[in-house]
Image: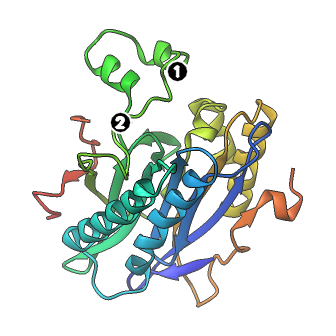
């Protein structure tokens, strides 16, 4: 799919999701629509996690279809998502929560920026000039240990508590979301994913697949396939977004987001290119 973000810039995207090889439900949800791209990884058992993640992304859908978007609008939608997920949690026997990570395009003086949003350990990456950079910061026990200098990043990847998150929508007190401004740069690629990808496929292999597949949908399919080949122990969801220069209304258009099961296909660290939302782009 493709959409314009200014006079000559187009976003071209693809998405794929799979429940994995060991789960009976897919508790991941995603939003890939015009200028908003998010992945949510639900938790809570039975169908509570599935409902929580779907509720979170649905709360953000208006960001892709409304008027001007800024950080205050995004935070209001996140507050709505928090309240709606909490309402699920208050139902008898249905504790629920969800991570949320992704980007939405905002403009300042007619210049587009990504507003990167994160709660939990789903991730948002930027591929620029062949280099992959994680824009989000994991809200997890092991990330806190890494930042405290108690373990290395390599040790964190195999730590027994690596899946324990310290922030999630639906938790109490309400989590503080991270929000960053990052410039939208021509030819860059954004990857948003659940930990079902990053828990199975290392960054080096992710880069290889992103570079090997120029079409976003093909890249998303390949990443999900790699996670399945590596064990597929969790739900896997991937959204890939390219910044392209459009030549006409159909520039760069690709196939719609894909569900592999239906299709049959197998924090105090500021990103170097970003700005804190309190400062605003400038």
> At which x and y percent is residue 67?
31, 88
Nearer to me, 150 or 218 = 150
Q: Please, which colouring scheme is shown?
A: rainbow
Residue with the mark numbered 2 = 139
> At which x and y percent is residue 139?
35, 36
Disc on res. 157: 1
* Residue at figure coordinates x 34%, y 46% from the top left: 171
> At which x and y percent is residue 205?
66, 33
Image quarter for residue 137?
Answer: top left
**First along the sequence among labels 2 and 1:** 2
> At which x and y percent is residue 25?
71, 50
Dot 2 lies on which element?
A: loop
Image quarter for residue 241?
Answer: bottom right
Nearer to me, 52 or 64 = 52
Image quarter for residue 250?
Answer: bottom right
* Residue at figure coordinates x 40%, y 13% from the top left: 152
Mark 2 packing: few (<14 Cα in 10 Å), some, or many (20+)?
A: many
Mark 1 packing: few (<14 Cα in 10 Å), some, or many (20+)?
A: some
* Quadrant placement of the C terminus: bottom left
Q: Nearer the viewer, mark 2 or mark 1?
A: 2
Please say if the residues under marks 2 and 1 sit with CB atoms less than 8 Å apart: no
Nearer to me, 179 or 92 = 92
Q: CA distance from mark 2 to mark 1?
A: 14 Å
């Amino acid at each position: 799919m493709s959409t314009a973000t200014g006079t000559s810039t187009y976003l071209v995207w693809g998405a794929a999701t799979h429940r994995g090889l060991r789960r009976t439900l897919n508790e991941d949800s995603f939003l890939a629509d015009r200028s908003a791209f998010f992945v949510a990884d639900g938790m809570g058992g039975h169908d509570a996690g599935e409902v929580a993640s779907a509720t979170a992304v649905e709360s953000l859908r208006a960001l892709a279809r409304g008027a001007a978007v800024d950080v205050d609008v995004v935070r209001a939608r996140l507050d709505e998502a928090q309240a709606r997920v909490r309402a699920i949690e208050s139902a008898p026997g249905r504790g629920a929560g969800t991570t949320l990570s992704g980007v939405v395009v905002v403009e300042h003086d007619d210049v587009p920026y990504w507003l990167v949003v994160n709660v939990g350990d789903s991730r948002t990456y930027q591929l620029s000039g062949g280099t992959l950079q994680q824009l989000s910061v994991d809200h997890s026990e092991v990330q806190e240990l890494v930042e405290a200098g108690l373990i290395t990043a390599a040790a964190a990847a195999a730590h027994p508590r690596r899946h324990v998150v310290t922030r999630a929508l639906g938790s109490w007190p309400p989590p503080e979301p991270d929000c960053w401004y990052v410039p939208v740069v021509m030819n860059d690629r954004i990857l948003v994913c659940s930990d079902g990808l990053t828990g199975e496929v290392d960054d080096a292999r992710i880069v290889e697949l992103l570079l090997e597949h120029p079409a976003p949908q093909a890249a998303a399919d390949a990443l999900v396939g790699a996670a399945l080949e590596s064990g597929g122990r969790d739900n896997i969801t991937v959204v890939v977004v390219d910044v392209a220069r459009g030549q006409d209304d159909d520039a760069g258009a690709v196939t719609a987001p894909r569900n592999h099961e239906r299709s049959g296909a197998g924090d105090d660290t500021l990103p170097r290119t970003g700005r804190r939302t309190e400062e605003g782009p400038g």
